[in-house]
Image (cartoon, grey):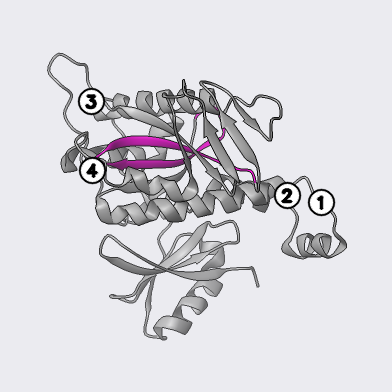
Amino acid sequence: MSELTVHRWKRHGKDRLYVNLPDGTAVAWADLATKVITVKMLMYRSEAVALLRAQLGHSATVREHVADAVKPRSKPAPTPAPPQGRGRLPRLPQLTVADDLAENRPGAELLGAVAARGPSSIRRAWGKVLGRSSEWDSYYIGLGGERRVGRELERLTSQGWRVLHGVPKSNGGDIDHLLIGPGGVFSINTKCHPGASVWVGDSMAKVNNGPPEPYAAASKAEAAYVREVLERHCGFPVAVEPVLVFVDVATVYRAVTQNKVRIYQEREVSALGPLTGVLTPDRVEAVYAVARHRRAWLRG
């Protein structure tokens, strides 16, 4: 038996059970209202169906469609027409579940790396018993940080915000989180330094007075990249603000000259919730429809 788990998911009027691999990849899901099971990865069909039928009953029906044949969980907003005088916008293919970044959980990139190359859960537990450190410790710390920030961001959805996690970049790596809503678009970079004192300047940061780290500069470059991708497909200007969120730190000191990047501790991201006046509801959905499409970023 593989290590499949079942998680309930409720959002945007949907109520589902997802079956996931240890790295977070969804292999099947079931709609609780219709009791229809959709299998995304046929190699896990038997086990996934058994897990879901254990909760739904044996009357649940199975739809054996591969990922690109499954309807997305919500209809993407149509790509707006290009403004007068501009060329034709690049056309994205129909959104599928496989390309829907709204399926990503916080820390998706780190989860994938750990699942592909990291230690098994048994080896990791044994290492803890023996008090041995591992090169993977930083991955698990980072994963915990992204999950904590992800939970804080999800609280903002009740105020009209959309949240994405683990958005891939065409040159490798990922954007930890994207927040899209009435107050604009925010590219969010998460840094976890348990118990540390952090100083942040215009382009560099210092952790416990250590060597300079280009956190702020990297966040600004990432926001510029996000803006380029979104404007290419949206057809209207999309301002993107960079945000640095420090998790589990003791203190954060912001230099007086640091005004290009928003700096928060994880519980402070709620300050973004009340922001308004940048995007109309229609444009929030238009930007979100592009941002959630994996192909937009891999072509960026």
Asked if disc 1 and disc 2 are in contact, CB closer than 8 Å, the reply is: yes
Q: Quadrant of the N terminus?
A: bottom right
The residue beneath circle 4 is 285
Image coordinates of residue 12 in percent, x first then y, are 27, 60
* Residue at (37% x, 36% y) in the render: 186
Image coordinates of residue 218 in percent, x first then y, are 53, 25
Asked if disc 1 and disc 4 are in contact, CB closer than 8 Å, the reply is: no
Q: Residue furthest top?
A: 85
* Residue at (50% x, 71% y) in the render: 6
Q: Nearer the viewer, mark 1 or mark 3?
A: 1
Q: Quadrant of residue 4?
A: bottom right
Label whose residue precedes the other's in the sequence (4 or 3): 3
SS at mark 2?
A: helix
The residue beneath circle 1 is 133
The residue beneath circle 2 is 137
The residue beneath circle 3 is 235
Residue in the foreground of this view, choosing between 271 and 10: 271
Asked if disc 2 and disc 3 are in contact, CB closer than 8 Å, the reply is: no
Q: Nearer the viewer, mark 1 or mark 4?
A: 1
Real-space Cα separation, disc 1 to disc 4, in angstroms: 45 Å
SS at mark 4?
A: helix
Q: Is residue 124 magenta?
A: no
Q: Amino acid at mark 1?
A: Ser
* Residue at (54% x, 73% y) in the render: 46
Asked if disc 2 and disc 4 are in contact, CB closer than 8 Å, the reply is: no
